[in-house]
Image (cartoon, helix red, strand yellow):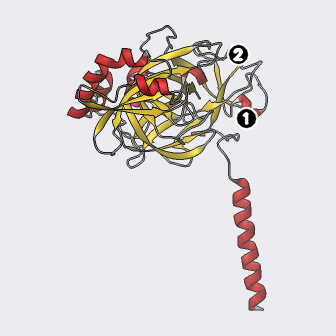
Amino acid sequence: MNKIITTVVVLAFQALVFYGTAQAQSHTDYYSRPIPMGVSISTTPSAPSIFAGTAGMRVRSLAYPSLKFILSNNHIMGAVGPSLCPDTAPQFTWILQPGTLDIGFDPGQDPTYVAGLLAGAVPIDFSPGANNIVDAAVAITSPSLASTEILGIGNPTPQLGVAIPGMPLIKSGRTSGVTTGTVQSINATVLVNYGSECGTARFVGQAITSAGLGAGGDSGSVVLNGNTRAPVGLYFAGSPFNGVMNQIYWVYASLGVFVDSDVPVTSSDRQSIEQLRVPYVDERIAKLGAVQARHEARIMGIPGVVGVGIGLAENGKDMALIVYCEKMTPEVMRKVPKSLEGVSVRLIESGRFEAH
């Protein structure tokens, strides 16, 4: 009799586990409202294409904290068909969850899928020598449509975070889910390809991450400090070996927003965001930044070089200039110096950076 009861209990537990597993939702599924962040979104119309990116984080207006927004990339929420290039979506374009790629078709303005309406995007300049700092956009939403919780991570810490070399990272995105990595370099100037129809854009002041943090479709993910869970970056591009993210304080400043939570924005946070005062000072980085500024144009002019930043040297302790190249060819290895003004130069094969 006891054996029968034990068997029944075991089977019931197994059934419960199976049911829970069967009901678990992925980042690409449809979510009942309010949706978590870190899941699939897109715009409509997207036809003739279907696509998807990631709802990064719920933020609020600095000027009017009652206004809530979904934060993501311009090339995700600021793009509509047929080109899907950034800056093509008019204000109040519908933002859908999941994205049309994961729905399987473009449903148009079907209220079943709406998560918000495009409120604003930072334009991307595709001209040579442009100094883009963010690929970012916000969609106005409400607590009934979008949650502050990031799928698989929880609520972000309402602090003004800054990515620094060696920092552990975590993010939740549409394609690769919850992943971890580290900051490889900061203050990076990178060339990002948005496709033959849209062009290549030059970004400055970026943070480059280690491999495996993101993939195509993860664009729009908010990247958090792996220890504190404070947002530090907005993921928007990558290569076979690296990811690229905007420093989050530039995103906040460009859009006039801050991470949404029950904790009030402090006057020091507001001042730091609005005046672009980075709450992290390292004399080594300041010194290397000056060296980088003097030599960057020449290095970026070397065929095959796609980025220059400041990060950790090979020994993992000292700081160095980091040069990224599409391929480690003999010509690149010959033309990129081993050191500049006494500062070591580390050459890394990244592949081409592309909007994800």
Q: Does residue 200 appear to the left or right of 65 in the view shown?
A: right
The mark found on residue 81 in the picture is 2
Q: Is residue 4 above or below residue 272?
A: below
User: What's under tag 2, amino acid-wise?
Assistant: Gly
Residue 82 vs residue 353, the one in the foreground: 353
Q: Is residue 61 visible?
A: no
Residue bearing mark 1: 102
Q: Does residue 174 appear to the left or right of 202 in the view shown?
A: right
Q: In the image, what residue occupies the spot 54% across and 46% down?
A: 179
Answer with mark 1 or mark 2, whichever residue precedes in sequence. 2
Quadrant in which the C terminus appears: top right
The answer to which quarter of the image holds residue 287 is top left
Q: Residue furthest bottom?
A: 1
User: What's under tag 1, amino acid-wise?
Assistant: Asp
Q: Does the residue at mark 1 contact the one at mark 2 (Cβ under 8 Å)? A: no
Label 2's element? loop
Residue 93 vs residue 219, the one in the foreground: 219
Q: Is residue 13 above or below residue 68?
A: below
| Horizontal and vertical percent position of residue 315 | 33, 45
